[in-house]
């Protein structure tokens, strides 16, 4: 695990688990695959900028991934978009249930 990725990777995994979400559920909600998300959560690789943004929105700003890749990222706009992401994730979860 890369030292600089460890705190974010650990926070990402802990947040997902504390919300009772599987890798597959989060991966589908943020348009990636579970294998990629697993590598990110273990600190093996950083997320690409767009995925970092989607994770930031999905977790409503709890995960500071966006700042790692884009210090100029507009957190206010992303938080406003989080309602749409949450709604989409719930619909996806209902459809799979």
Image (cartoon, grey):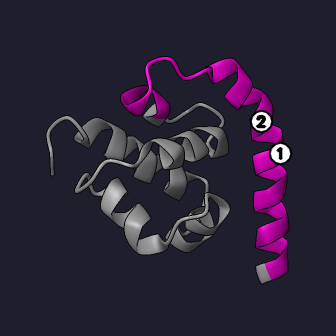
Q: Is residue 72 magenta?
A: yes
How packed mark 1 is, by other alpha carbons closer than 10 Å (few <14, some 14-19, many 20 or more), is few
Whether residue 70 appears in this view of the structure is yes
* Residue 59: image location, x then y, percent: 61, 42
Counting the numbered discs, the total is 2
- Read off the residue under disc 2: 81
**Residue at 70% across, 19% down:** 76
Q: Give the quarter of the image for residue 77.
A: top right
Give the alpha-carbon distance from disc 1 to disc 2, as whole Å: 6 Å
**Residue at 75% across, 38% down:** 82
**Residue at 61% across, 57% down:** 30
Magenta span: chief secondary structure? helix
Asked whether 70 or 97 is in front, the reply is 70
* Residue 89: image location, x then y, percent: 75, 60
**Which portion, as a residue range, is magenta?**
66-95
- State if disc 2 and disc 1 touch (CB < 8 Å): yes
How packed mark 2 is, by other alpha carbons closer than 10 Å (few <14, some 14-19, many 20 or more), is some
Describe the element under mark 2 as helix, strand or loop. Answer: helix
Q: Is residue 23 magenta?
A: no
**Residue at 39% across, 49% down:** 47
- Read off the residue under disc 1: 84
Left or right: where does residue 22 sit relative to residue 7? Answer: right
Instruction: Look at the image and tell me in which quarter the C terminus lies.
Output: bottom right
* Residue 19: image location, x then y, percent: 61, 54
């Amino acid at each position: 695990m890369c030292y600089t990725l460890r705190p974010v990777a650990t926070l990402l995994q802990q947040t997902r688990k504390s919300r009772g979400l599987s890798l597959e559920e989060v991966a589908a909600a943020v348009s990636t695959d579970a294998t990629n998300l697993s590598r990110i959560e273990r600190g093996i690789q950083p997320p690409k900028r767009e995925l970092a943004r989607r994770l930031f929105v999905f977790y409503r700003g709890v995960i500071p991934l966006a700042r790692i890749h884009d210090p100029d990222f507009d957190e206010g706009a992303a938080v406003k978009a989080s309602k749409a992401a949450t709604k989409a994730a719930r619909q996806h979860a209902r459809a799979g249930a």
